[in-house]
Structures are given as C-alpha cells and as structure tokens.
Image (cartoon, rainbow, N blue to C red):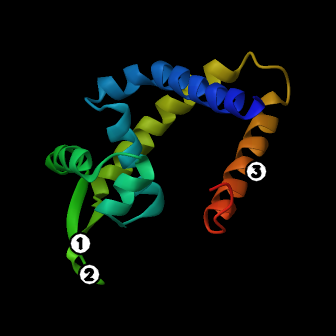
C-alpha cells in the first residue's frame, strides 16, 4: 500500500536526520526530544504544558521531567496561565533565544552538508511538498476526515 510506504519513508528520513543531528544535541547535554521542546517554545511562544506535550507526542508525565531539566538549565520557565489557574504555561527565557541562535547555525551547517549532494532543485521541491502535506493534514484535523 502506497500510504504505508509514505509513512515508513517519512519515519526513516526522520530517524536518519535525528541520528546526524544527535551529536550536536548531545554536545549541549540535550536529547532530541529536549531540543524539540526548546525549538517549539522558541518558535511558538508560551504554551500550555499539556498542549506542548501533546504536540510533541509524549505523555504529560514524561514531559514534566523534560520540562524540569530545561527549567533547571535556565532555558525555560513556568508561568501561571492567566486563562486557567490550574494550568502552567511553558515560556522561554532570554537565554533560550541566545541558545537557539547559536545551535541553529550548527544545525544548518550540518543539514547543508547532508543535503548538498541532492540533485538541483530537489531540496526546494521536498520542502514545498512537505509543507503542502502538513497544511493538508492540519486542515483535515479540524474536519474529522480519515477517522
């Protein structure tokens, strides 16, 4: 089935890219999941802890440990959610922005090396196609298709 092949290929590409980038994260004392948390908070701003855990696809109990470690490192902070006193927002600190800027340069260099041997225009086509797929799937989530 072509759909399963697509899913398998996406998973394999993800694993291989993470394997290439893992040494950069490890040099900073981070796991790939911790790096993903930092990236999402930096990109999206303050988020509810439960929303962020769900977005990454990990249980809230697992997220709590990750969150605690990143707070201890001074990269994230807990702030009360003004809309729900029972919830906590995850927010980046000023140190997070500096950290992301520094690490992004190293990641981009590594990825540039990985993708440099692809045939001309391939990277741009992949990017456009994956953005199209993401946008399609995000639109489908709200409509209940495929369930």
Q: Position of residue 67 (x, y in %)?
A: 23, 50
- Other-residue count near label 2 (Cα within 10 Å), few / some / many at <14 / 14–19 / ≥20: few
Q: Position of residue 24 (x, y in %)?
A: 39, 25
The image shows residue 147, relative to residue 106, as above or below, that is below
Q: CB atoms at circles 1 and 2 under 8 Å apart? A: yes
Judged from this view, the residue extending furthest toward the right is 120
Circle 3 residue: 132
Q: Quadrant of the N terminus?
A: top right
- Residue displayed at 30% across by 84% down: 83
Nearer the N terminus, badge 2 or badge 3?
2
Circle 1 residue: 87
- The kind of secondary structure element at disc 1 is strand
Of 1 and 95, which appears nearest the observer? 1
- The kind of secondary structure element at disc 2 is strand
In whole angstroms, how far apart are the C-alphas of marks 1 and 3? 33 Å
In whole angstroms, how far apart are the C-alphas of marks 2 and 3? 34 Å
Circle 2 residue: 84
Res 125 visible? yes
């Amino acid at each position: 089935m072509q759909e399963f092949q697509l899913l398998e290929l996406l998973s394999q590409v993800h694993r291989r890219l993470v394997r290439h980038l893992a040494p950069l994260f490890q040099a900073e004392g981070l796991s790939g999941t911790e790096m993903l948390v930092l990236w999402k908070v930096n990109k999206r701003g303050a988020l509810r802890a439960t929303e962020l855990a769900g977005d990454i696809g990990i249980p809230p109990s697992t997220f709590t440990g990750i969150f605690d470690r990143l707070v201890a490192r001074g990269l994230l902070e807990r702030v009360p959610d003004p809309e729900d006193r029972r919830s906590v927002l995850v927010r980046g600190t000023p140190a997070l922005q500096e950290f992301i800027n520094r690490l992004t340069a190293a990641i981009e260099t590594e990825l540039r090396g990985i993708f440099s041997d692809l045939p001309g225009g391939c990277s741009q086509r992949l990017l456009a196609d994956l953005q199209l797929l993401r946008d399609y799937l995000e639109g489908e989530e709200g409509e209940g298709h495929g369930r």
